[in-house]
Image (spheres, helix red, strand yellow):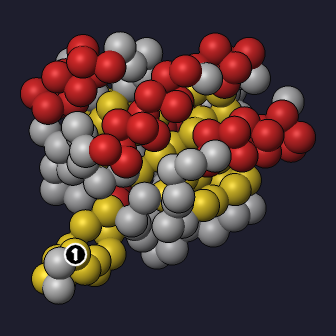
Amino acid sequence: MAVKVGEKAPDFTLPNQDGEQVSLSQYRGKNVVLYFYPKDMTPGCTTQACDFRDNYSEFEKLNTVVLGVSPDPIERHQKFIRKHGLPFPLLADTENEVAKLYDVWKPKKMFGKEFMGIERSTFVIDAEGIVRKEWRKVKVDGHIEETLEFIKENLA
């Protein structure tokens, strides 16, 4: 099932960095930026997470929560959050179930080797749980500003 703009976002439950179960549906009444990224502590993922961190108060002003999802285990998320002072939850999708649900678990290539991994993607979900925007194959530079602008223009 592919996620489609204008349709209800598939609900899911995953553990956050503290092992608490987090469901998308618990954020009804708020906008959600759901972003999928390949791996904690890597350069692009660190830049993206820190960009979200640095703009987090702007998202809060727009009634928007940020949720990061990667295949990393809880312990790695804890280290990533501590090291970079991230103010938002990171969810551990260790079995890639949610990545598959949102169709971001894709074949990738690096150094001539093929493997399965996360395609960096962001979904904006409105307060009623409807997918309002998606970005796939996200380029980190400028992405957070683009996301904020979309929310200001369409959901504020």
Q: Nearer the viewer, residue 73 or 98?
A: 73
Residue hosting label 1: 110
Secondary-structure class at tag 1 = strand
Which residue is most to the right?
153
Does 83 appear above or below 21?
above
Q: Is residue 74 left or right of residue 4?
A: left
Tell me where residue 104 sits by quadrant: bottom left
Callout 1 crowding tier (Cα within 10 Å): few <14, some 14–19, many ≥20: few
Residue 49 percent across, percent down from the top left: 42, 33
Residue at x-position 43% and y-position 22%: 88
Q: Nearer the viewer, residue 21 or 62?
A: 62
Does 129 appear above or below 132?
above
Residue at x-position 32% and y-position 62%: 118
Q: Is residue 96 left or right of residue 85?
A: left
Residue 84 percent across, percent down from the top left: 32, 20
Does residue 57 appear in this view?
yes
